[in-house]
Image: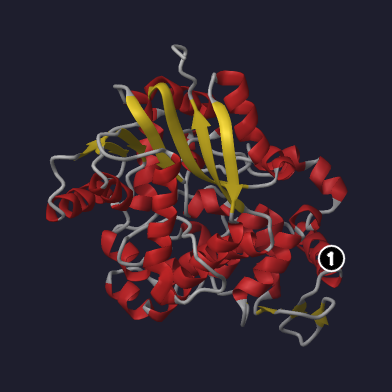
Amino acid sequence: MRTAEPRSTARQLAPPSPTAGVDAVRWPDVAAPAKASAVTTAVTAAVLRRTFERLPLRVRFPDGTTAGLGGPVLDIHDSKAFHRRIGAQGLIGFGESYMAGEWDAPDLVAVLTVLAANAAELIPAPLQRLRALWALRRPRTQRNTPAGARANISRHYDLSNDLFALFLDDTLTYSAALFRALPADRSLLVAAQHRKIDRLLDLADVGEGTRLLEIGTGWGELALRAAARGAHVTSLTLSHEQRDLALRRVAEAGLADRVRIDLCDYREAGGTYDAVVSVEMIEAVGAEYWPEYFRTLEARLAPGGRAVLQAITMPHERMLASRNTFTWIQKYIFPGGLLPSVEAVAETVRDHTDLRIARRDGYGAHYAETLRLWRERFTERADEVAALGFDDVFRRMWTLYLAYSEAGFRAGYLDVQQYLLTKENPAR
């Protein structure tokens, strides 16, 4: 089985008494978490209880006491371990505590939605001001240099094509769908993914003879639909697994003469294109490389060309506060990842290119619904996930990831944008 096996980032490991049932080799920081002193653990418990008392939650502790204003239930099964982990590593500890089974929730999304909606107030203001002192710093090994980006992408997208196929729809599209109405039935997901892709291609004015560059192939559905319109597509990916399957799908569709898929970093791309499309790939670029990413879009576009992006965004002030810290998502799900803000995209485009943002549309509620459908399917097919060799900790990790993401969109903390960027034609 190919699964994420993050190196231990704990400042100090507890004695080797792994949590029952946790593979200490595969999950070192779940089995033997970072130690926090008795004082830190006690302070963490007191701070969290005061925080819970202000939230519309019902937090149940193993001693029978409760906290909160009432609402979705959060069950803490091991208070000492829960507080020790969070005291030592903050939100990374919160996620690892769930992976270890130390807390749970009958409605996980509802609990996480409350937390996401109150994200800016979860940590007391004095501690927020001292964030640089206590927050873990992002490892330099996760920088998205050309070599680092390949390693980061492989950690997620090369897990297993079969795993992704278990919870995605038949298009194998791993980005927000666009529904006609919400809530949506699972049977409508394929049509909603095609609606999203077609809208992106329409924005990019892709048609017969269009020279299209796609940055981030996924499993090839956008390239297939563009080629079916008569476009000539060059698609770039860093995932061996995705490229292999996408090439098979292109061949089976009889479109190999119109689609080329290269194992190539966006910075290494050449050529000139009428249009560039990049769907939820900027999240893997990293803030220090955003200028280079947008300069690449500009360089690859012919005069008069169009670049279309789909991007997940977060509030600007939260992005600034967390851009240099190490998060649970970065450690276990998307190493090197960082969500931009709408303001950061606008500033980068303005300050580093001559591109113009001609249009921006947000539809975060549709991503929440997409994630719900993926999460429910992932849960229903847990036995098949296990049959692929992914253990209980992995399945809890991915359940938390999907629920955490859905909650972010339901709370409005996260959004997803479709951008149209244009390159003026100097000849006009």
Residue 190 seen in this snapshot: yes
According to the picture, the residue beneath numbered tag 1 turns out to be: 46
Question: Which residue occupies the foreground of this view, 286 or 245?
Answer: 245
State which quarter of the image contains the N terminus: bottom left
Q: Amino acid at mark 1?
A: Ala
Q: Please say if 356 is above or below 91.
A: above
User: Residue at position x 64%, y 40% from top?
Assistant: 342
Q: Which color scheme does this rendered protein use?
A: secondary structure
Query: Picture quarter containing residue 276?
Result: top left
Residue nearest the observer in this picture, 378 or 44: 378
Where residue 17 sits: x, y (%)? 52, 67
Q: Is residue 16 visible?
A: no
Position of residue 294 relative to residue 283, above or below, is: above
Percent position (x, y) of residue 103? 62, 75
Which of the 4 image quadrants contains residue 298? top left
On screen, residue 256 versus residue 203, left or right, reads: left
Residue that appears at 37% across and 69% down: 167
Q: In the visual, does 193 lie left or right of 59?
A: left
Report the residue at 49% width, 39% height from top: 282
Which class describes the residues within 10 Å of circle 1: few (<14), some (14-19), or many (20+)? Answer: few
Q: Nearer the viewer, residue 110 or 217?
A: 217
Q: Give x and y (percent) for residue 158.
A: 31, 51
Number of labelled discs?
Answer: 1
Which residue is at 19% across, 54% downward?
A: 249
Residue found at the far top of this picture:
427
270 up-or-down from 174: above or below: above
Label 1 SS: helix
Q: Position of residue 187 (x, y in %)?
A: 39, 76
